[in-house]
Amino acid sequence: MNEHDSEMIIGILDQMNFTQTENKAEADLIIFNTCLIRENAENKVYGNLGELKELKKENPELIIAVCGCMMQKKEIRDIIKSKYRHVDIIFGTHNIHRLPELLSKYNQNDEMLIEVLEDSDHITEYVPVKRKFSFKAYVNIMYGCNNFCTYCVVPYTRGREKSREPEDILNEVLKLSKEGYKEITLLGQNVNSYGKTLDSKLTFAQLLYMLNEVDGIERIRFMTSHPKDLSDELIEAIKKCDKVCEHIHLPFQSGSNNILKSMNRKYTKEKYLELVEKIKKEIPDIAVTTDIIVGFPGETEEDFEETLDVVKQVGYDSAFTFLYSIRKGTPAAKMEDQVPESIKNKRFQKLLDTLHPISYNRNLPYLNKIVEVLVEGTSKNNESILSGRTRTNKLVHFKGEKSLIGKLVDVKINTVKTWTLEGDLITTK
Ligand code: SAH
Ligand code: SF4
């Protein structure tokens, strides 16, 4: 979501005739779009801002702006006001579209210009976007979150849940298809509750059926599904809509019912496992990925074993794993029994050691299979190797011409690794 916000910021600046540079010393304007989800993301921002002090001295005309989730917190704005006085503009997550006004309002000699809204009921449409790719695109379908998982800052930084009107989403997707985009990823903190704030009460499944009809779009992905709201209607839609990819990201966070309760996740281990079983039965080749938090307050060795048990029972294709990070202002930050770092780290390593062979095993059936790949670019280390993704979101490397970037091709897999598949190009579409 933050990446997509950055695409909007760049789109706005592009319309104002700014161009991008990789060289900080050359910039007239530097913007940091910040994240508050975990402490290390937060600390990085302070480090980056500190480094710019010298640059600002050398070039007083330079405008430094900070936006994003961190700026929604008053305590953090206060730290920036007192310790990073070389920052010129601060804005929040609800008023990105105000950037042109803020830049014109800002006067070099003035105080720091701060504009942050606590929340907003309004969704601003038609914000210009400069997308990173020309063939795959993020599309917001909703903003904010009402779930208040006890560890998470998102409901505080992104406000209450609100869905975009289906017509607005459809118009954006139609425009993308006209521009030649092949893949869209629908974004929301909990896409399963899409539509609840709309008069039409359109469901997420109904939205998928609608978008599945858009000519030119070949693949539809979505992120993220909260297990508590994943309906049978949605499973059927994933199965029936040919463009909806066979991949579901279904964060479970912890396998222990005590911890899940304390996290306010509103499902049990058993319910989660039942749900995955149902999905796998209906869509046999579906890839299942997840998010897991290690070391939530009160997590005992037994609780952690329950997490490992879920990992083994589900057999994830891959997982994002996180060490629990205390976020000020969330209920979990005040919980007693915070788990010591050394124990968290040990469990974390054990979790990775459990996950990796499972991911490898999940890749094994791909050997000698022909898979459809959307070519995304060249490999990081070798320009003659292309990389792309299967419908199940597996990363595939193969030899091919750069001109294939953005195209759908068939690749026969000849090597299987934990993180990647390798193969030979068979046909281009
Ligand atoms: N809305 C999505 C998640 C968004 S945040 C969902 O509910 O699935 C992405 C992930 O960051 C979460 O799934 C969680 O695993 C992790 N996360 C959030 N807050 C965290 C914290 N305080 N410490 C560690 N990980 C956290
Ligand atoms: Fe955070 Fe939970 Fe909302 Fe996801 S559902 S954004 S983890 S509060």
Image (cartoon, rainbow, N blue to C red):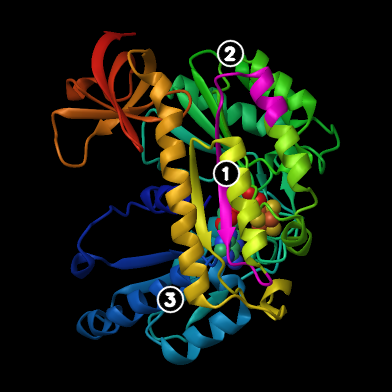
Q: How many marks?
A: 3
**312 above or below 184?**
below
* Quarter of image, res 230: top right
Q: Quadrant of ligand 2?
A: bottom right
* Quarter of image, res 18: bottom left
The answer to whether residue 18 is left or right of residue 262 is left
x and y percentages locating residue 370 in the rendered image:
36, 11
Which of the marked residues, 2 or 3, is nearer the chain's N terminus?
3
Which of the marked residues, 2 or 1, is nearer the chain's N terminus?
2
The answer to whether residue 321 is left or right of residue 158 is left
* Residue carrying label 1: 311
Region in magenta: 277-298
Residue 113 seen in the current view: yes
- Looking at the rendered structure, the secondary structure element under dot 3 is helix
**Amino acid at circle 1:** Val
x and y percentages locating residue 292 in the rendered image:
57, 53
Residue depth check, mark 1 versus mark 3: number of the one nearer the observer: 1
Tell me what residue is drawn at x 34 percent, y 67 percent.
30
* Quarter of image, res 254: bottom right
* Residue carrying label 3: 43
x and y percentages locating residue 196 in the rendered image:
82, 41
Query: CA gap, disc 1 to disc 3?
Result: 31 Å
Query: CA gap, disc 2 to disc 3?
Result: 43 Å
Q: Residues within 10 Å of mark 3 (few under 14, many from 20)?
A: few
* Residue carrying label 2: 242
